[in-house]
Amino acid sequence: MVRQLFMKVYKTQIIMKKIIFLLITVSIFLACSTNSITGRKQLALFGEETLQQQAITEYQSFLSQNKVVNSSSNKDAEMVKRVGLRISKAITTYYTQKGLANELNGYKWEFNLVDSKEVNAWCMPGGKVVVYTGLLGITQNEAALAVVMGHEITHAVAHHGNERMSQGALAQGLEIVGNIATTNNPKYNSLFNNIFAPGAQIAFLLPNSRNQEYEADHYGLNFAAMAGYNPRESIPFWQRMATASNGQKPPEFLSTHPADENRIAKLESIMPEALSLYKPAGK
């Protein structure tokens, strides 16, 4: 009798596991979509509106805790805003011409320069952008800055963060069936911060992150060119980045970013496409 009861419970557990696995599989299948711009299949378990709302909160929190450079009295901060506005306008035009204007719903662009020696820049969902003053010593000119900002903005408009969060949710076993994660869910908040917090990385996502980096390089370069910035500036910029690292970067297989020489080679291969889109400002 006990053995029969045990076997019944065991079989019930097996059936439940199969049902849960099936539900997860179906939810993953339904959540996979083809990116309108890159043409690549992406997993997106979280609503873009939800991510944008969370980004507003995190962005304002970050700005309140860091020294924001006033764009009305600082030429560098003014340049960051100018570059950002030109690139966002180029992206809006590009998406509209392709009949994809809805892809940018909810975007309320903000561009801020933050006083920090860190060589970094990033963009959160909804177009919340930060550039660190430490980056400007390596960009050295407006076109190179446009290359970097185009790259970071592409991460946002290509939904790379959503993709990484979705993969992270699966890897961490979060409750994803039915997309029940909300901003009130501590696990969701933790995952959001792990993906979007400045400098955040998740080790198990490294290979895919490099694919995202190449996509951001490709389309970011195109967007910078469309905004009137010379895409050729990307090569000397990344050469300067390589020199600035002094060989301290980890091997490519241990980094979310491609090795500098691989990135430069890739940029050179797509340069003709970017140049075909390049029209200097005022011409």
Image (cartoon, rainbow, N blue to C red):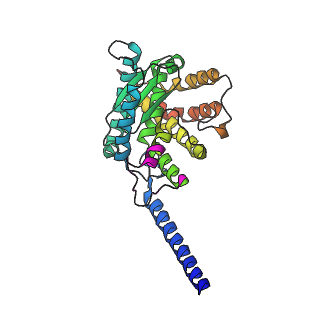
Give the mark count.
Answer: 0
Position of 104 relative to 34 (above/below):
above
Q: Nearer the viewer, residue 226 or 203?
A: 203
Q: Residue furthest bottom?
A: 1
Q: Please state the horizontal and vertical placement of residue 220, each as a whole percent of the image.
A: 46, 34
> Which region shows up in magenta?
172-190
Q: Which residue is depicted at the point 38% across and 31% down? A: 61
Q: Nearer the viewer, residue 188 or 165?
A: 188
Which SS does the magenta portion mostly show?
loop
Would residue 242 appear left or right of 30 to someone viewing this image?
A: right
Q: Does the magenta segment cover residue 65?
A: no
Q: Please state the horizontal and vertical placement of residue 154, each as a whole percent of the image.
A: 44, 37
Q: Which residue is depicted at the point 62% across and 84% down? A: 3
Q: Quadrant of residue 153?
A: top left
Q: Please state the horizontal and vertical placement of residue 126, each as a whole percent of the image.
A: 36, 38
Q: Nearer the viewer, residue 39 or 200?
A: 200
